Image: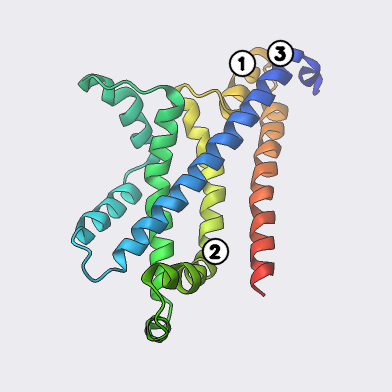
Amino acid sequence: MMGWLADPAFASLLVRGFATTFLLAATVVVASNLLALALAIYLQQPAARLRRLVLAYSFFARAVPALALLFGLYYGLPAVGIYLEPIPSAVAGLVFASTAYNLEFLRSGFESIAPGQREAARALGLRPAIVYAKVLVPQAYASAAPALFSNAIQIVKGSALASLVAVDELSAASTTIVAETYEAIPVLAFVAALYMVIAGGVLALQYLYERRLR
């Protein structure tokens, strides 16, 4: 039933696919969180002149399917003379989409903080950078943590879209193996288990983070 696992070619395909999926998802999670944090902090500034532009980006990135973004980058940009390799296309498209969701989660986290805490920090003479680093950002992340970690899992699963722009990740590996063995259910079940391993790692990190907050 699972004899295909003993085939070195298929095993190698799965190992490479797992590594690609893990690295792709990790890159997108880290990059989207950092960009979302920068944008969320910017929106907290009273003189944020580009507020409408940032909010328009947030709406657009959440409204347009991620697959359309990936196709636009990989298949559309060559029409204007810009060529991206499969992995950069996948990373850029997924980061573009995921940053918008993380931005909204963090924006909500910042807005949940009582205004008195900002005023108290300023009254103590703390510099704005210190106020954000020591007071506001930790509280915003604590409030947004469940949504951020859930989105990280969505990113892990959404990385399967990268197979449609020629990235050899887990879904692409499973398609190749199924096409050669015709054992769809065992192959897909095994690949699903590998996705669950990565998602389980994200949940473990969430548990450790929330435990630290207690």
Residue 126 image point, x, y percent = 41, 77
Residue 145 can be seen, yes or no? yes
The residue tagged 1 is 179
Q: Label 2 near label 3: C-beta < 8 Å?
A: no
Is 178 placed above or below 63 here?
above
Residue 113 image point, x, y percent = 43, 78
Residue under the point 51% across and 66% down: 141
Task: Tell us which disc is closer to us: 2 or 1.
Answer: 2
The residue tagged 2 is 145
The residue tagged 3 is 9
Residue type indicated by callout 3: Ala
Residue type indicated by callout 2: Ala
Is 182 placed above or below 69 here?
above
Q: Quadrant of the N terminus?
A: top right
CA separation in Å, label 2 and label 1:
40 Å
Residue 125 image point, x, y percent = 39, 81
Local crowd size for mark 3, using a 10 Å CA cut-off: few (<14), some (14–19), many (≥20):
few
Residue type indicated by callout 1: Ala
Q: Which mark is residue 51?
A: none
**Residue extending furthest front?**
125
Local crowd size for mark 2, using a 10 Å CA cut-off: few (<14), some (14–19), many (≥20):
some
Tag 1 or tag 3, which sits nearer the N-term? 3
